[in-house]
Image (cartoon, rainbow, N blue to C red):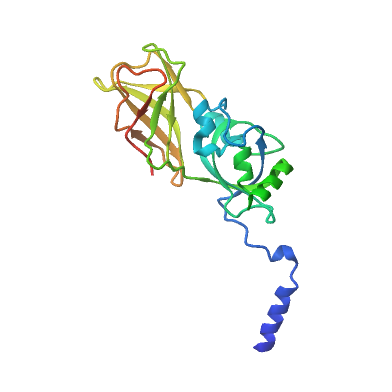
Amino acid sequence: MALLTQLIFLVFLFLPPFLCRSPVRGDTFTHSRAAYYPNSDQQGTSDGACGYKSFGATLNGGDVSAASNLYRNGVGCGACYQVICTDSSLCSTDGVRIVITDSGSSSDTDFILSQKAFSKMGQTADAGASLLSLGAVDIEYQRIPCSWPGKNITFKVDEASDFPGYLAFLIEYQQGDKDITAVRLCETENLTCKLIDRSHGAMWAVNSPPSGPLSIQMLLSGGDDGDETWVVATNNVPESWKTGESYDLGIQLN
């Protein structure tokens, strides 16, 4: 038995280094590359394709990203991901948690992170600076549930809206890992509903919106169970909604 133990020890001692690495992350992680966009050391962009404007620049503390395939014609806006670079000499094991706020690609990447988020993948500030000097790095990523403590889902009336004939809006602070793939606005008095078109990114818009206090219904798709479920907001949007205002819908997703 002692001889067998010594032989096993010698086998592992002389294994090639690539066989002695830490185990590869689970099947939930996907291999890709990430770059970053300049002039974004403290926040993201305020003109991203998702339509978040200034909200998109400061969302998640500025740890945001543009995405290529994951943008999914706007369905991917607001989704959260854990992004981990793979150079063990520079990269932390936890990486950074980002929110999709824009569309874009560079150097065969799935993500173009804010500069702030890109450097946070490093083990230290110096390691983060070294990552920035590389411009683009190999990564592994997985989708994770978004979490907005103390926030309910919010209905934000866009500045382009014109009461009462045109309503454009964003749905912000959605927790969880499901996508909002459809929205209905329902009149609370006669219960008639209108299915709303996605204008672009995370923006929804409708000409001649329903009148009266509006009940908001959202179709959630994806997630771990892959089911589709209509969710009805607890709070209504007031009859005389105002351009630029945000309305707390009174619900949140787990």
**Residue 235 visible:** yes
The mark total stands at: 0
Is 169 situated left or right of 22 in this image?
A: left
- Asked whether residue 52 appears in the rendered view, the answer is no
Residue 33 appears left or right of 199: right
- Image quarter of the N terminus: bottom right
Quadrant, the C terminus: top left
Q: Nearer the viewer, residue 34 or 190?
A: 34
Q: Position of residue 233 (x, y in %)?
A: 32, 32
- Residue ID at (25%, 20%): 190
Q: Is residue 200 left or right of residue 30?
A: left
> Which residue is more in the foreground, 79 or 193?
79
**Quadrant hosting residue 114:** top right
The residue positioned 64% from the left and 62% from the top of the image is 22
Can you say whether 22 is above or below 252 in the image?
A: below
Q: Residue 18 at what x, y percent from top left?
A: 72, 62
Please identify the quarter of the rendering in which residue 106 is found. top right
Q: Quadrant of residue 243?
A: top left
Report the residue at 24% width, 20% height from top. 189
> In the image, residue 43 lies at what x, y percent?
57, 34
| Percent of width and height locating residue 97 | 54, 45
